[in-house]
Image (cartoon, rainbow, N blue to C red):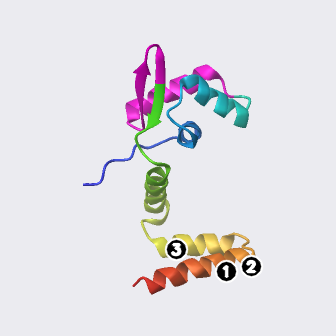
Amino acid sequence: MKKPIPRISDTEWEVMRAVWSRHPATAGEIADRLAQADPSWHPKTARTLLGRLVEKGALAYDVDGRIFLYRPLVTEQECIASASDSFLDRVFGGALKPMLAHFVERESLSPEEVRELEQILARRKNRR
């Protein structure tokens, strides 16, 4: 059975990225990483979100004296896959072809990006 992946809000994604980038990490280290990317981050906000992510099962922590060391319980790839599946189901009724067509037709793709997509599709076709 596949383990459930918690739903993560946009702000929680930022915190998770800070944890995924280097862990285990203290709340202070995580708050510093967030503030480097966006100075408007407040350490108390980071700590609140760390607590929520622990409750959701996305993070765990180990205690070393008075220090809490946070580590991810889910990988970035697992969260991306879960969020992608959720988006696909909600917006496109689970149909992949209309979603891909929508983005390919709507976005301006460089010739290099078109070549990369063609290579991905060719690899996929060859795996069958």
Neighbor class of circle 2 (other Cα within 10 Å; few <14, some 14-19, many 20+) is few
The amino acid pointed to by label 3 is Pro
Q: Quadrant of the N terminus?
A: bottom left
Residue assigned mark 1: 115
Do the numbered discs 2 and 1 sit on residues whose CB atoms are within 8 Å?
Answer: yes
Q: CA distance from mark 3 to mark 2?
A: 22 Å
Report how far apart the C-alphas of labels 2 and 1 lie in the structure: 6 Å
Provide the residue designation for mark 3.
98
For mark 3, does the 10 Å Cα neighbourhood hold few (<14), some (14 to 19), or many (20 or more) residues? few
Q: Relative to residue 109, is residue 53 drawn left or right?
A: left
The structure residue drawn at horizontal position 60% and vertical position 82%, both measured from the top left corner, is: 118
Where residue 103 sits in the image (x, y, percent)?
62, 69
Upstream in sequence: badge 3 or badge 1 = 3
Q: Of tags 3 and 1, which is closer to the observer?
A: 1
Instruction: From the viewer's side, name the closer residue of 21 and 99.
Output: 21
Q: Which residues are magenta?
A: 41-68
Tell me the residue at 52%/74% (across/down): 98
Quadrant for the C terminus, please: bottom left
Q: Return the disc, 3 or 2, that comes first in the chain's sequence.
A: 3
Q: Is residue 57 magenta?
A: yes
The disc labelled 1 sits on which kind of residue?
A: Arg
What residue is shown at x 61% (from left), y 77% (from top)?
Answer: 117
Report x, y in % for residue 92: 48, 65
Q: Is residue 98 above or below residue 66?
A: below
Residue 120 in percent (x, y) is at 55, 77
Which residue bears the numbered disc 2? Answer: 111
Q: Which of 73 and 39 lies nearest the eye of the viewer? A: 73
